[in-house]
Image: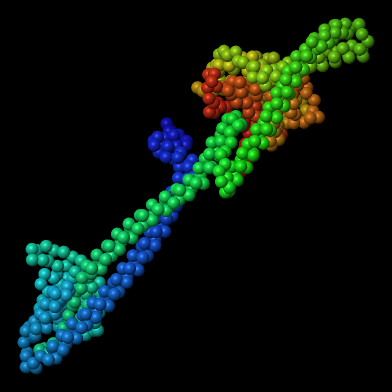
Amino acid sequence: MLHLRPRGTHWLPRPVRRGLTFWRRSIQARVVASTLLLSTVVISVVGWYLLQQIRDGLLDHRVQAVVGEANDETAEARVRLEAASPTDADVASQQRDLADPIIQRGDTRGFSVVLAGPTGPGGRIADGGTNFTRGLDTSSVPVSLEEHFDKEAPSAWTYTTIRTTDAQGVTSSSPGIVVGSQVLLPADARTYTLYYLFPLDEQEETMALVTRALVTAAILLVLLVAATVWLVTRQVVTPIRMARQVAERLAAGQLQERLRVSGEDDLARLATSFNQMASNLQRQIRQLEELSRVQRRFVSDVSHELRTPLTTVRMAGDVLHDARADFDPATARAAELLQIELDRFETLLADLLEISRFDAGAAVLELDDINLVDVAHRIVDATRPLARQRNVEVVVQSPGHPCLAEADVRRVERVVRNLVANAIDHTGTDRTGGDIVVLVEGDDHAAAIAVRDYGVGLAPGEAAMVFNRFWRADPARARTSGGTGLGLSISLEDTHLHGGWLQAWGRPGEGAQFRLTLPRRAGGVLRQSPLPLVPTDVTEPVP
């Protein structure tokens, strides 16, 4: 069985949903967060660039200093070797005399020394015969630098890691610079290499201090920027939030609400304009309410006042209609037409009275459990004579079980009757198409009836206008079913009274479909309909 994840964010934990809701609704939070992110990126890039520049400056200065010191030591060593006795042929003794003074000065000045050689095969540090500072790991001299001095070469330097072992046997390592220089030993007239290893401990401590200072300054700067942005956005967002709250109260009907104006800046001018707009809206709404009240009163009064003369005219019309057999053909036909128009006038008057009750809020429901399948069959049976006049067949497609809903059966039947009569009125022998289909379906939360016809259809935009009072798609077209132009408007009011939906779909030349959706229980909230609004036999165009 395929399991579909619920749409939206309902599957997320409650704290996450609250955080997402706060993020969506708070422009201040988004501005502060965006500014923090951008500031952090900019400060990080600038800080990294500054650290690189400081590091390169420190290293360049240190390299110049250690290369100069190494050259001085080498120059002094060459002077001592040149002053050595020509008769001294003890190579080992001369190596010690060369290396020991430099090693001693290195101990006091903080650098280490390695004497390797002679150049050529067997002259590497690892081959033995090496004098070096006590505790120094001779592998601290890179192999690449040793390869450089396998033959006579000028002085060179490189970065390395200096590894040492103290008197307690504790091994440590630190970054450093190794400088190599060659000297000629008179005892054997061969070239030896002096390696000077200078640690970068001071530079490393300086970089750590600068890094801590920059990080601290960056954090403080980001917090300062965040506080500044929060303060600035608060000054802008607070009036906007107040305007939103006042707008919500105005939308809820509290037309006397106004914004408090302080100052003369742009926000103050906006508040003044908003208050002027609210005052104008209040005045217009009151005028419209008064006009609507007068209109409803007029419709109600006229409808009630017409009942008495209509009753008198109806009685006289009935007498004339019953006696039409004694009249000449023209008078008899006039009596029949009078009877037909009186029937339509009575229907119109009843609809006007019903509309006036809706406008006055006096319409109430008489709820009962009804079966929409039975309602559909009753309406189809009642409208069958009208359908036969139009050469149209009305069929019902329903599930094999009852489709129950808690509703007012009189009002639901009136809605369905209006929909079926409207479908018959727009379908007939002069139209291409098929039968009118009444579909009934239900689920656990809603029940629906859809009326599908294959008549003239609806043009784009007309689906939202068909429920307007006295609206017709073709004003020149006659109402063959004797409608008053208020049927769909009353049907929409009946549907809203039930808390349901009444929707229309149509396309020119492909007919129309009207769908009534009711909650299964009174007061229930509709989320979807058991029937689609667009008929299943229609192919929607690909956008």
Which of 449 and 537 lies nearest the eye of the viewer?
449
Residue at the far right: name it: 328
Residue at the far bottom: name it: 86
* The quadrant where residue 302 appears: top right
For the point 15% across and 85% down, which residue is it?
77
Q: Position of residue 243 (x, y in %)?
A: 55, 39
Left or right of residue 476: residue 419? left
For the point 58% across and 47% down, which residue is it?
264
Left or right of residue 495: residue 207? left
Residue at the far front: name it: 263
Left or right of residue 284: residue 527? left
11 is higher (above) or lower (below) than 222: above
Indicate the quadrant containing the C terminus: top left, top right, bottom left or bottom right. top right
* The quadrant where residue 259 appears: top right
Q: Position of residue 474 (x, y in %)?
A: 77, 31
- Residue 386 visible in the current orientation: no
Which colour assignment does the render follow? rainbow
For the point 24% across and 79% down, which residue is it?
67
Q: Position of residue 390 (x, y in %)?
A: 76, 22
* The quadrant where residue 315 appears: top right
For the point 13% across and 70% down, which residue is it?
136
